[in-house]
Structures are given as C-alpha cells and as structure tokens.
Amino acid sequence: MDVRTGALRTITTSLTTTAALALVSMPAQAATDHVVAPGDTVSRLAAKYGVPTASIIAANELDARATIYIGEHLIIPTASPRPSRVTHVVVAGDTAWDLAAAYGVTVMDLRRANSLNAAATIRIGQTLVIPGATAPPAAPTSFLAAPQASQTSTYIVRSGDTLWSIARSVNTSVTSLAQANRLSNPSLIRAGQALTVPGLAGAPVVATDKNVGSLSSTTSAYIVRAGDTMAAIARRYGTTVSALAQTNNIANPSLIRIGQAITVPGGTPSGLVGDTFLGRTYSTAVVAAANVNKATLNSMSVPSRTQMQQLVIDTARSMGVDPALAQAIAYQESGFNQRAVSPANAVGCMQVIPSSGEWASGLVGRHLNLLVAQDNVTAGVAILRQLQRNGTSLDTAIAGYYQGERSVRERGMNSDTVRYVASVKSLMARFD
C-alpha cells in the first residue's frame, strides 16, 4: 500500500537547527492569528501589531528573507502582562494535556511548575499552578477530538458493500455501525438492508477526489478573527464579497467584527493550495479536494504548533513509537502545522493522504478524521509503527513514509527519498 504523504517539504526541509530547537523550547505566550493579505510584509505587520519583526520571524520559522504568502496563517506574538498566580483544582476526567490546551500552556510547563513526573500524572483534588496563565479558560477546547455522535441517517446496502466500505463512505467506524444496528456479525449484511448510520454533529468531513463535488456544494461557517476582511474571507473560500454579503444580509461589507459567524456559500475554494509539488502536477479533482480541506482547516480552531508537538510526543509514547522519530517526521512534513495541506491532498500535521488515513483507521480499529488534531497524529504514528514491523530498518521505515512502502520495496529509494531520510534522521538527533 502506498502511504506517500506528500508534505510541504520545500518549506520544512530548509529550517535551521536553531529554528528547530527554538520550536522545541518555545514558551507559551499570547498570540494573534493573522491571515496574510496582498501588500502585507513582516515589517508592516510588526508595525501594525506593535511587536518586533524578529518575534514574528521566530514564531513562524520564516526564512532569512522573511518570505510570506497570501492566505498563509501567521502567529503574531504579543507581549503578555506579568501573570498573576492561576491555579486549577483537578477534577475527574482532567488530564495534563487537556488542561494545557485549555489554558494555552504546554504540558512541559505544567510538569515543571508542579514537579510532575515524566508521564505528567495528576490526581483528583490536586491543586496545580498554571504557569503564564492570567485567567481561567473561558470554555473547554474542542479541537483535539471529533464531536460525539448525535444524529442518525439511513443507508441502503448495495451489492458488493461491506460494513467497512460503508463505514468509510459515511465517515464513521465499523464498531459504531455494528452497535447502532445490533449486528452480532459485522460480516453478515445483505443487499437492500437498511442500516442506521450514527452521525457526527458538526464533525468536519475530509474531502477526497471522490466526494469533493458533494462537499463543495454545501455551506460552512467561518468565525471572524483579528485582521480579517470580507475580501480576504472571500478569497480564502473561492467566493465573492457580494455573495458573502448577500448570504449574511450584511449591508456594509466593511463592517465585520471579531467573533462574528459568517456563513460561506457553497463552491470549491481555490487559490489556497497550488497544483504542483516537487515537479509533479496533480489532477484537478485532487487539488480541488485539497483546497476544500485547507478551507475547512482555516475555519477551524486547531492547536498551536507547540501544542501539536506535545500531542505528537504523547501519542508516540502511548503507541510505542520513538517520540524523536514521530517529532522528526511531523517537523519535516509540516513544522507541526495542523493546517498544512499539500497539492497531493496530504492533510494536517502528519501530512497523511485520505487513502493512507483509511489504512491507519484499519490499523487502530476506529475511524480517524484527518482534520481532527488527535486523529491526524494517531494516523501518522500508526503508519510509522506499521512501517517498522518485523524488524524493518529505520531508514526503510522513514523512506516508506515518504515514498510508499511498496514503492521502496519494489524499486528502492528514489534520490529525493534518500535526502528525506537523511533530513529526518538529522532531526531525530535534535529531538532525542
């Protein structure tokens, strides 16, 4: 099975040792998400937000020329006031990761501030100091896991269907389908049978070249952020200012406010993801799906790069994969950016294409939604674990993640794969 993930390697491969190490130890800080508009430069943004140019460059791991691109999300670090002491009393269900995400700090910061062990173990009733936080979180975060099932629909079994193929097509798991329909033997379904499909209310759907037509005809919601304009939102979703204004009954398109919910009319977004990468041009359907996924991720709340890095570490440890390897792959592929999407429709931090996501779902025994941070990392780590089975060498496993396991086995490593393996191994030494 080809598991090539096709990431934005032209950006991440050139990152320096200093930038890599800075990302590992980057402290939590207040930040603004800015979408680059025509005419933006780093120096202009620095003046606009009142922060040093060097801070923007460091926060986004920009190259020496501070190159930025229209539509790109930039982290604008802002100076934080001297924090007051914020504490949290642990209740049932709390984990160090959930608390770190909720308060906008890192698990490492929590461990250091509270002398926690390497596993960041906490206990009910324990009072934790939240370093760097100035107030309790306004609401619990929801970007780590997919929404819970709350709606149902009906699917009529066709000749040749299996419960696994149906689960993939309706974006759920075999277990969920079996439980919803009280199937004692999931292998026994018949043509014409009506199956109840448990829905995921609000769950984002991963666009592929097969379903992009149906997804692009729907509407979506976008929450206005600092620096947004109607023109920028329209460009991001491949629509027009007039269409947005008409859909949302906005009399003056110049007047939108932070936090406002904008309904985006259907249509395939364009201009977010190109069609060529590493000399290969991808089909219109694949690029269209990539643009839909990019637009969806742009409209979602996702973890910061530092939070994604910690999620990679935690997931790798829980799945028995070397955290240094998982971090090196994630950094090489996307720089820990959950919003990254390539022209090959490789999605998220681990840059997994939908077909590989389906494979990873089978490996872990549940449906994985590549647009959801935890599922994306789980998919990538599951693939890494599978590629190292039966004593496969590290070099071959890394090559398989990039080029595809079958391709490496049948043809050996391509020249660019050799360079990729060397880069990942170099990064491993930094993350070890």
Image (tube, rainbow, N blue to C red):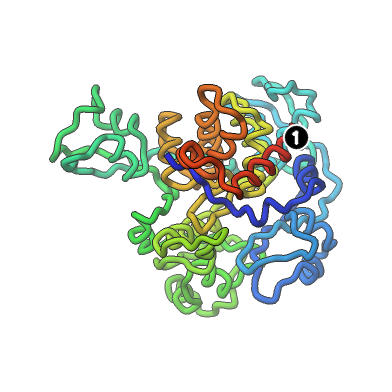
Q: Position of residue 92 (x, y in %)?
A: 58, 24
Taking the image as drawn, is residue 133 in sight? Answer: yes
Quarter holding residue 391 = top right
Q: Which quadrant of the figure contains the C terminus?
A: top right
The reply, left or right, for residue 317 in relation to residue 273 is right
Which residue sits furthest front? 411
Q: Position of residue 297 (x, y in %)?
A: 53, 54
Residue name at image x 77 percent, y 31 percent: 129
Q: Position of residue 104 (x, y in %)?
A: 70, 43
Taking the image as drawn, is residue 138 in sight? Answer: no
The reply, left or right, for residue 265 in relation to residue 236 is left
Give the crowd class for mark 1: few <14, some 14-19, many >=20 residues within 10 Å: few
Disc 1 is placed on an element classified as helix
Residue name at image x 68 percent, y 23 percent: 119
The reply, left or right, for residue 263 in relation to residue 214 is right
Residue name at image x 59 percent, y 28 percent: 393
Residue name at image x 54 percent, y 50 percent: 6
Dot 1 corresponds to which residue? 429
Q: Which quadrant of the figure contains the N terminus?
A: top left
What's the amino acid at mark 1? Ala
Q: Which of these two is toward me, 112 or 59?
A: 59
Q: Position of residue 125 (x, y in %)?
A: 68, 21
Q: Is residue 102 above or below residue 116?
A: below
Q: Which of these two is toward me, 221 or 334?
A: 334
Which residue sits furthest left? 192
Quarter holding residue 48 = bottom right
Task: Tally the numbered discs.
Answer: 1
